[in-house]
Structure formats: C-alpha cells, structure tokens
Image (cartoon, rainbow, N blue to C red):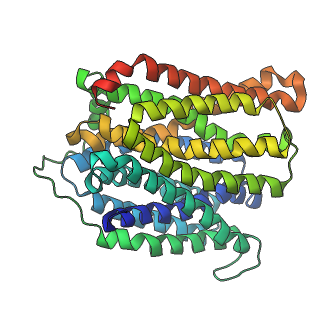
C-alpha cells in the first residue's frame, strides 16, 4: 500500500513519539515531585520554550525553503533530541535538567518543521491525506507503545538501564535512535530545482513571515492557521485535563483512567488513517468541518451523563476525532501554502502547537472558578467551554469557505 519512503517516514514519527511521550508524561512529575522544584519554574521553562520557538520555527522552515536539505536539519535536531533524552537519565542538577528538557522539547518541535515538509516530497497531492494519517497513526502507536514498554521500568520491575523515571528516559532515548536511524540514513530527499540564497537573519525572517500573511495570496494560509490555533487549543486542553475530569467528576479509579487513555490513543491512531483517507476522497475542508463540529457536539453531550459505559462511548468517539483532526491539519497546510514557501508556514504551524496553552487552559480554569458553587460538577462547565473554541473554529471554516475552496481544499 505504501512505498518504502513512506514507511520510513512513518517509522520516524513512531520513533520520536516513544521518547517525547515519556518525557511529556514523566518529566514534570520527576522535577516537581521527586526533585522538589516549585512548579512555577517548570511553567516558566515552557514559556521560555514558546518564546524561543516564536523566532526559530519560521526561520527553520525558511532555511529549508531556501535550499538547506530538510533531512540534514532533521538529523541535527534528532541528535539534539537524543542528547537531551540520554542526559536526562544521568544528570541530577535541577537547573541543568530544565535546560535538557528545553533542549529536547525545542529540538523535537523544530524537527517537525522539515519533517512535515517531506510529506510533499513523498506523497502525491491526491494521497497526502492517507499518508499524513499514516504518520499520525505511527505517532499515536509510538506514544502508546513507548509508555507500555517503559512502565515496568517506572514501577521498578525491570532494571536494564536503571529504574524509575531516569531509567525510562534512557530506555526511550535508545529506542528512539534505533527506530529513527532507518529514516535518517535511508530517506532520499527530493532535490530542489533551484536554490535561493540562505538567510539566517532570524528576527528579520520572523517578521517577514508574519507580514506575508497579510498578502492576498496567503490569506487562505492565515485563515487556516487561525482555525487550527483555536481548535488545537481545545484539543490540547482536552487531552491535558481529561484525566482530572475523569477523576473528579466521573469518580473513576486510576485503572479505569489508564484503560480509557489506552482506548483513546489506540482509536486516535485508527481515526488518523480514516480521517486522512476521507479527506483525500471528499476534500480537507469538508472533512475537517465535520470532525470539528462532531467534536464540539461530543463535548456537549459527554457532560450530560456519567457512568462507565456512557463515558466509554465518548472515549471511542473522541479518540477517533482526535486522530483525524491532527492528520487532516498537516495535509490541509500542504494544500494551502505556496510550494516555494511550505517550510516557512510549517514553522508557524509548529508554533501554533506550542501556543495551544494560550486560550484553552485559562478558559478551563476560569469556567471552573465561575461555576465553583457546583462543586465537583464545575468541571462539566469547563469541558463545555472547550466546545466554544471548536464552534468558533467551525464558524470560521464556514464563513471563509470561499477563500479555502478557491485554494482547492
């Protein structure tokens, strides 16, 4: 079904998810609970990372647009990811640990800019949806299997490279490089017909990228990025706070929460394939509109009931929608961005992922405060508030349909 190049491409997405999934889940617990660092320092580190990415992400894309080989950029950032992951397992100084976490996270986000650009090289336009879905499928499977593999190390049942969270970081880092190497060594990059002069004026390139969004030919890209930012705020906030919702509102045990998480991640992988395939057949605009409005309605309905089987239904539905959303988003941008500027706009795409805490988490918390008189049920209103972000993105999709359709979406 897929060519060798596509399989290698998906394998890299699988590989980096193993390491980044473990870091995302366990590092905050390690640095705050085990090391006793106040969580404000971790929050400030995340903020610093977002600021750095504001300037770096568009520039990395511009470098690729201007002739720097995408694979070489991916290799550089992969080495930095590996260094960060391995070092987390041997360093004990909390300040240095925060630096290494920042190194791994920023390198991962920056690697996705040239990596996502390669979708254009390896897949024909009419097949980019299913190929993007395959990449997202690999991402979710890597995240899930990575957590399963390192769980015995976290629990102290296996001691190959140490036990606990540091042992998990090292094991995940070694798995990352083992599975990433085939892509890094064997991927054949499509040669550019014409190379432009590489610019490295990061500040100027950043402002030029933002100013370019005002241009008429880039209007569709600007609309897409705004829609994606709103919906992604809802998506990231949903995945972050759902465990809290299940515990406080649903009164579920840790075992049930793990079960729901496993089901959701597995179905997200399936949803990525389905969503990508449908977007190839019926168009990105139509399928993304359906996914977003279905997601909004599901969030509204899920808060109206409770109980294991009631919630399980929505775990299945939301898992499928979650995978489809991210798979279609990557393909959508390849269709909207001018071919010679794909990297620049994938830099903004990566940046929007990091800015997904801008609206969602504050909206969740404010809703909980406003409806605090309802006790534990206050989080039902928080969940409802996320549907507002999705509805807003859906309305923008419909109002701006003419812009998007003109771009053959």
Counting from the top left corner in percent of width and height, residue 58 is at: 34, 41
Looking at the rendering, in which quadrant would you find the C terminus? top left
Identify the residue at horizontal 52%, vertical 73% (top origin): 175
Q: Is residue 40 visible?
A: no
Identify the residue at horizontal 47%, vertical 68% (top origin): 83
Identify the residue at horizontal 76%, vertical 78% (top origin): 157
From this viewpoint, which residue is outermost toward the bottom? 160
Counting from the top left corner in percent of width and height, residue 315 is at: 70, 45
Q: Is residue 349 visible?
A: yes
In this rendering, position of residue 310 left or right of residue 165: right
In this rendering, position of residue 299 left or right of residue 53: right
Identify the residue at horizontal 85%, vertical 30% (top origin): 377
Counting from the top left corner in percent of width and height, residue 229 is at: 49, 32
Question: How many labels were placed on the picture?
Answer: 0
Camera-side residue of 134 and 199: 134
Looking at the rendering, in which quadrant would you find the N terminus? bottom left
Counting from the top left corner in percent of width and height, residue 346 is at: 35, 42
């Amino acid at each position: 079904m897929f060519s060798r190049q596509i399989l290698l491409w998906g394998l890299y997405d699988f590989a980096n998810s193993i390491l980044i999934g473990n870091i995302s889940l366990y590092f905050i617990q390690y640095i705050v609970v085990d090391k006793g660092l106040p969580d404000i320092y971790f929050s400030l580190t995340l903020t610093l990372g977002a600021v750095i990415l504001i300037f770096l992400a568009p520039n990395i894309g511009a470098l690729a647009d201007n002739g720097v080989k995408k694979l070489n950029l991916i290799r550089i950032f992969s080495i930095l990811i590996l260094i960060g992951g391995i070092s987390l397992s041997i360093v004990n100084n909390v300040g240095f640990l925060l630096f290494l976490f920042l190194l791994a996270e920023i390198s991962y986000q920056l690697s996705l800019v040239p990596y996502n650009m390669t979708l254009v090289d390896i897949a024909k336009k009419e097949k980019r949806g299913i190929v993007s879905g395959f990449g997202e499928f690999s991402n979710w499977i890597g995240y899930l299997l990575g957590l399963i593999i390192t769980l015995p190390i976290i629990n102290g049942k296996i001691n190959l490279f140490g036990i606990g969270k540091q042992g998990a970081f090292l094991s995940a880092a070694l798995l990352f490089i083992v599975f990433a190497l085939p892509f890094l060594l064997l991927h054949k990059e499509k040669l550019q017909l014409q190379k432009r002069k590489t610019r490295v004026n990061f500040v100027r390139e950043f402002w030029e990228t933002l100013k370019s969004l005002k241009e008429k030919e880039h209007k569709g890209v600007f609309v897409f990025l705004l829609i994606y930012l709103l919906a992604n705020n809802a998506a990231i906030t949903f995945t972050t706070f759902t465990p809290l919702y299940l515990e406080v509102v649903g009164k579920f045990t840790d075992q049930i929460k793990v079960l729901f998480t496993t089901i959701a991640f597995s179905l997200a992988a399936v949803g990525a394939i389905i969503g990508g395939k449908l977007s190839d057949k019926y168009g990105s605009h139509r399928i993304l509109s359906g996914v977003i409005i279905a997601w909004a309605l599901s969030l509204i309905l899920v808060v109206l009931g409770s109980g294991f089987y009631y919630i399980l239904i929505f775990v299945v539905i939301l898992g499928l929608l979650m995978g489809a959303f991210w798979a279609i988003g990557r393909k959508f941008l390849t269709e909207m961005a001018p071919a010679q500027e794909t990297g620049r706009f994938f830099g903004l795409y990566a940046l929007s992922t990091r800015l997904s805490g801008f609206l969602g988490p504050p909206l969740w918390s404010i809703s909980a405060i406003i409806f605090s008189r309802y006790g534990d049920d206050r989080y039902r209103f928080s969940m409802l508030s996320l549907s507002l972000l999705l509805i807003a993105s859906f309305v923008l999709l419909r109002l701006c349909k003419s812009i998007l359709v003109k771009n053959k979406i």
